[in-house]
Amino acid sequence: MRESKGGPRKGDRRLNRREAVAVMAGGASLVAAPAIVAAQTSLTVSFVQQRGLLYAPVDMMVTGGVLQQEATRLGLGKVEASARTLSGPAAVTDALLSGSADYGAAALPSLLTLWDKTHGTANEVRAVGTMSNGAMVLYTINPNVKTIADFTDKDRIAVPSVRISFNAMMLEMAAEKLWNDPHRLDHLTVGLGHADAVAALSAGYGKATVTAHIAVQPFTERGLKLPGAHVVADSREVFGGPLTQVTLLATKQTRDKNPTLFKAVGNALETSIRMCSADKHAAAALWKKAQNASESIDELLALLDDPGFEFTSQPHRIATFAAFLKRIGSMKSDVRDWKQLFWETAYDQQGD
């Protein structure tokens, strides 16, 4: 660079040769080299999720270092990634829409309802990709309840969030099949995180504030160990087969803010899913450590080996569930193609 006579002009941020050498030696001040400091600043990525084995790919990306590997491969340098665990889908979607989180791992109903409200807007929400499928189980400690028809107004059914959680909608679909009234049991549901629901039920029938819980693993297994606990309904029966359960969501603003970083997250998600599927022991060990889970690795492996549990990038029965939500009034838009709900990071998958 050319200096003016007598040295750099006042306020000129460019470095002369002596200053550049000083910077490389670590002797220049931060004020003297803003461009270099900016280049050394880490990118930050924040994830929010609920608690459960279904969310293990997020822990693999963050705690397992897969996102950093993908970011390095794409030339992004250091990425500071964090993952917070929240109590239910409402908290996850609030964090996503408020911008306090970049990505949110949430169940299929959250994707559908958020897309329905935001598509075509500057803050449109779509899925980066799917993550996992697993059975939800409705169990109870009430000895008088054998089917959902046996619940009375004295019962309370714990779900992560009333009306909007996948668990609550499983109950609505079961009620629609039985009574042609999806909202027949809505008034019995109460919002509780899975761990809190199991803790509440542990007080025992007649003392517990809730009498039933629609759970995912490992909380299903924990709940069914309680005295008198027994299964009332299983999501595989209610949905008629495998159905995408958990997806990773992001807003258009997150996607557009740093497209290369967005691509790294998409790549890391798919890589993490493959790793969790290929080595379930490693996935269980990583999840146990990341979530400080009480189960042994052998117990977690048994849950991962359940035939209804899978880590997968393939979208399943999206349109079927979207039609159900429209039928019960939870969404207004028609879904003609599952790709309407996903960013381009998922377009290589074979979905339905």
Image: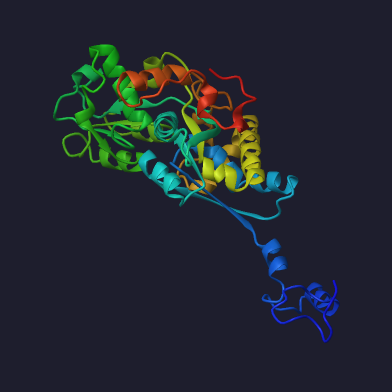
* Image: 32 above or below 41: below
Whether residue 156 sits left or right of residue 218 in the image: it is left
User: Which colour assignment does the render follow?
Assistant: rainbow
Of 5 and 128, nearer the camera is 5
Query: Does residue 159 appear in the picture of this structure?
Result: yes
Q: Is residue 7 above or below residue 287?
A: below
Q: Front-most of 51 and 251?
A: 251
Q: Nearer the viewer, residue 129 or 288?
A: 129
> From the viewer's perspective, is 237 left or right of 58?
left
- Which residue occupies 23% across, 23% down? 183
Q: How far across and down, in percent of the image, does residue 230 sit? A: 30, 24
Location of the N terminus by quadrant is bottom right
On the picture, is 281 further left or further right than 93? right
In this rendering, the count of numbered labels is: 0
Residue furthest to the bottom: 6
Q: Position of residue 114 (x, y in %)?
A: 41, 34
- Residue at 47 percent of width and 21 percent of height: 318
